[in-house]
Amino acid sequence: MSSGAAQRLQTLQRHVGFQEGRGMEPGSSPLTTHVLDTASGLPAQGLYLRLSRLEDCGQQWTELKKSCTDRDGRCPGLLPPGQMKAGTYKLSFDTEGYWQKRGQESFYPYVEAVCTPSAPSPRRSFSPSQMRPTSSTCHCC
């Protein structure tokens, strides 16, 4: 097995075992993201992002946090427990910066995922789940 294939297999195995209980421990963030770089077949490590909430007065986005994905393509601690409230949230992903660091051009300078949970939930997930230099698929759940 090639070293690239072995690395992808190890990553996949880590994710399969990783899902059980991930992020649901006391004190974990009610909002998560998981970004996959489908060009390499690996998690998108080092992707910068911003979390914002749409405020009623003035319909302005208020930045809540800036962060970066870890080696698993996740960003723990986006929102402290108890801070999630009903409203509209946006994650802005710096896809251009991510691809530039890898020596590639990005068709999209950024990707935004916007969701409006009707009530606080134990966990919400935003994810540009299939990211390539020329495309990105987002979903909120």
Image: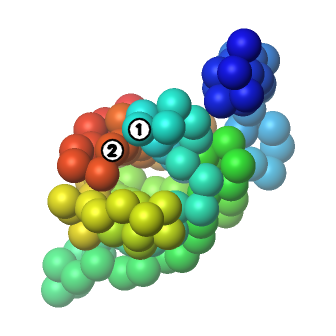
* Looking at the image, residue 1 lies above or below residue 46: above
Assess disc 2: are there few (<14), some (14-19) or many (≥20) residues with their C-alpha within 10 Å of its C-alpha. some
Q: Which of 29/58 is in front?
A: 29
Is residue 103 in view? yes
At label 2, the amino acid type is Arg
User: Which quadrant of the structure image shows residue 108?
Assistant: bottom left
* Looking at the image, residue 12 lies above or below residue 120: above
Q: Which of 91/64 is in front?
A: 91
For image coordinates 65% across by 30% down, the residue present is: 4
Q: How far apart are marks 1 and 2 (CA)?
A: 5 Å
Q: On the picture, is 44 further left or further right than 1?
A: left
Asked if disc 1 and disc 2 are in contact, CB closer than 8 Å, the reply is yes
Q: Which of 24/70 is in front?
A: 70
- Residue 23 in percent (x, y) is at 71, 39
User: Which quadrant of the structure image shows residue 81?
Assistant: bottom right
- Residue 126 in percent (x, y) is at 42, 44
Q: Mark 1 points at which residue?
A: 39
Q: Mark 2 points at which residue?
A: 132
Is residue 32 in view? no
Q: Quadrant of the C terminus?
A: top left
At label 1, the amino acid type is Ala
Q: Quadrant of the N terminus?
A: top right
Q: On the picture, is 39 further left or further right than 70?
A: left
* Looking at the image, residue 82 lies above or below residue 63: above
Q: Residue furthest bottom?
A: 58
For image coordinates 27% across by 44% down, the residue present is: 136
User: What is the basis of the colouring in this image?
Assistant: rainbow
- Residue 140 in percent (x, y) is at 34, 38
Task: Give the mark nearer the N terminus: 1 vs 2.
Answer: 1
Assess disc 1: are there few (<14), some (14-19) or many (≥20) residues with their C-alpha within 10 Å of its C-alpha. few
For image coordinates 57% across by 36% down, the residue present is: 42
- Residue 44 in percent (x, y) is at 54, 48
